[in-house]
Amino acid sequence: MVGKMSKKRHEEQDLSQTERQLLHEMIETYQGLKMMSRIMKWIALFIFMCVMDFSRFIETLENTFSHLKKWITKA
């Protein structure tokens, strides 16, 4: 009976070691995905800001050219 109990305890210990290893891998994967998510959010924000600034830049150029055109046609 004592031999069976120690064998059972050893199997539980191996299982918990496997569970710890799997849990550790899951945590590492989660942290990696979380970091990638943060990086992707910053990249998306940067691209959005560039597009908005480019849009305003193009609009400014159009306004400048239209004012120059009006000024030249009046003169």
Image (cartoon, rainbow, N blue to C red):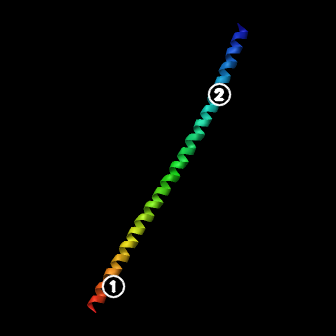
Q: Image quadrant for the N terminus?
A: top right
Residue lying farthest to the bottom in this orientation: 75
Other-residue count near label 1 (Cα within 10 Å), few / some / many at <14 / 14–19 / ≥20: few
At 39% from the left edge and 68% from the top edge, which residue is drawn?
55
Residue lying farthest to the right in this orientation: 3
Q: Is residue 4 above or below residue 25?
A: above
**Circle 1 — which element?**
helix
Gap in angstroms between the C-alphas marked 1 and 2: 74 Å
Q: Is residue 61 above or below residue 26?
A: below
Q: Is residue 43 above or below residue 24?
A: below
**Circle 2 — which element?**
helix
Going by the numbered disc 2, the residue's amino acid type is Thr
- Sequence-wise, the earlier of marks 1 and 2 is 2
| Residue 9 coordinates in the image, percent (x, y) | 68, 17
Going by the numbered disc 1, the residue's amino acid type is Leu
Quarter of the view holding residue 64: bottom left
72 with respect to 26 (left or right): left
Q: Nearer the viewer, residue 16 or 45?
A: 45
Quarter of the view holding residue 48: bottom left
| Dot label at residue 18 | 2
At 57% from the left edge and 45% from the top edge, which residue is drawn?
32
| Residue 22 coordinates in the image, percent (x, y) | 61, 32
| Dot label at residue 68 | 1
